Image (tube, coloured by chain):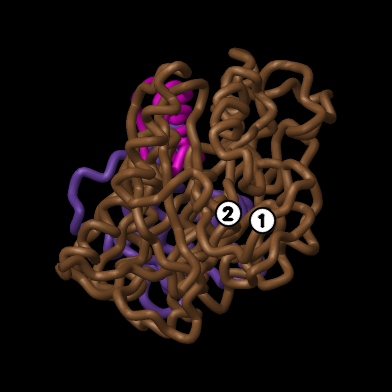
Amino acid sequence: MAELKEELKEKIIAVLNLEDIAVEDINDNDPLFGEGLGLDSIDALELIVLMDKEYGIKLSDPKQGKTIFESIESMSAYIAENRTK
Amino acid sequence: MKNNVFINGIGAVTAQGIWRTELFEEASELNEAVNHAQQPSYKEFIAPAMSRRMSRGIKMGIYAAQQALDEAEVTVPDAIITGTGLGCSEDSEKFLRNILDNQEEFLTPTSFIQSTHNTVAAQIALRLQCKGYNFTYVNRSISFESALLDALLQLQQGEEEHILVGGVDEVSDHTFRLLQLIEEVKASDTNETVKTSVTPGVNYGEGATFFSLGVQKTRSSYAELVDIHIQHRVDRAELPDFVAQFLERNTLAAADVDALLLGYNGDSASDSYYVAFEALFPQAASLYYKHLSGQYDACSAFGLAAAASVLQQRHIPSRLKWKDNTAPGPLKTVLLYNQLKGKDHALTLIRAC
């Protein structure tokens, strides 16, 4: 799981082009939206595509997103349970 | 009665750095096939959360726009008008590459949103909360002049009082390689300047140059923008008539023009027109600018900045001189002429104020 979290942080930094942010700066339980990383709705779309492309997970219910994208912790747990690749 | 229109502020991000009084004294001649603009620090202008999604073209545009507005002491202009030949080509390439690499799946929104040609004008407006007229002209090498003409007409008619107008283009890798393949741009191993050019193509560049135009002359005014004329095709034989008509409508004779600012770019297909043009103004000083900016579609905006600076300073920096001739009298009137390979001809007349 620790490996997946690291990988996820790296991918998020790359995909969202988070300048000046390193893997070590993101805590597993930091909120990704609002406070914490301060991501917005366009980033949410980028994360949905990332889940599909990298882990084969299609989020059909947008309401799920709010819980899944809460933090690296919640995101990695969902990926570990539902990944198809 | 038409309003007079003044260039009250200039901002730029160029291969010679940002806009400053000493730019032309400090400038060095470009001799590379590709010349990126020297990027300033954007941190004080653009929030990191916004900046991370922006390509160079957008950042350069925002920086140059703010510089021009600051100099003119305008907080929010009435309108924002830009010209760009290729728009945000970096993001366009990214989006298209994603389509190919991912077999049309997994398309992310950011590069698509940022790839449209009007992104720069839109981002400037968003940042300034400017809800006025916002327009982007995409007409290859007369994109900037089209924007400038729109601004001039609106100001002359009294529809607006302050307009921010600018030209911006960015270098993107794939487009650059394609332009090299078709010999529009010089091969990477050539080290020729505009003057020493012998091989086909041009030295390519990028940049953003913005102007704050207003109907009132201010203490920061550079020059008066008098007239612009654009025409897609002009045969070389028609050039004298094309010029004569423009001078006539501005009640000028050729001898009234003190200096010419010409778009020489080292490619004979374009430069032969400038030679013919110069011959029509034997008394005027000949200046050029693409040896400092590189050739890109909106580079004539940098040319206008150079001409405006010459009129404000009443001095021609040696770096801008195409020929070592000087204007016969005091510098009052400068005529800019740009075209590319015999198409998209633009005449821009500015006067000291």
Q: How many marks?
A: 2
Q: Which chain is purple?
A: A
Range of magenta residues: B87-108
Crowding around mark 2 (Cα neighbors within 10 Å: few <14, some 14 to 19, many 20+) is: many
Location of residue B309 in the rendering, given as x and y in whole percent from the top left corner: 59, 65
Three-letter amino acid code at disc 2? Asp
- Secondary structure under the numbered disc 1 in the rendered image: loop
Q: Which quadrant does the N terminus of chain B fall into?
A: bottom left
Location of residue B62 in the rendering, given as x and y in whole percent from the top left corner: 46, 65
Please give the residue where the numbered disc 2 appears in the rendered image. B258
Residue B19 vs residue A24, the one in the foreground: B19
Q: Check whether the beta carbons of the residues at disc 2 and disc 1 lie within 8 A of each other.
A: yes
Q: Residue at x 62, y 28 (%)?
A: B275
Q: Residue at x 77, y 25 (%)?
A: B197
Against B155, is B102 above or below? above
The chain identifier of the residue carrying mark 1 reads: B
- Residue B148 horizontal side relative to residue B37, left or right: left
Three-letter amino acid code at disc 1? Pro
- Residue B75 is at least partly visible in this image: yes
Mark 2 / mark 1, whichever is N-terminal? 2
Assess whether residue B103 is covered by the magenta stretch.
yes
Residue B18 vs residue B116, the one in the foreground: B18
Q: Quadrant of residue B24?
A: bottom right
Against B273, is A54 above or below? below
Location of residue B277 in the rendering, given as x and y in whole percent from the top left corner: 54, 31
Query: Which disc number belongs to residue B328?
Result: 1
Q: Which chain is brown?
A: B
- Residue A1 is at least partly visible in this image: no
Q: Quadrant of residue B217?
A: bottom left
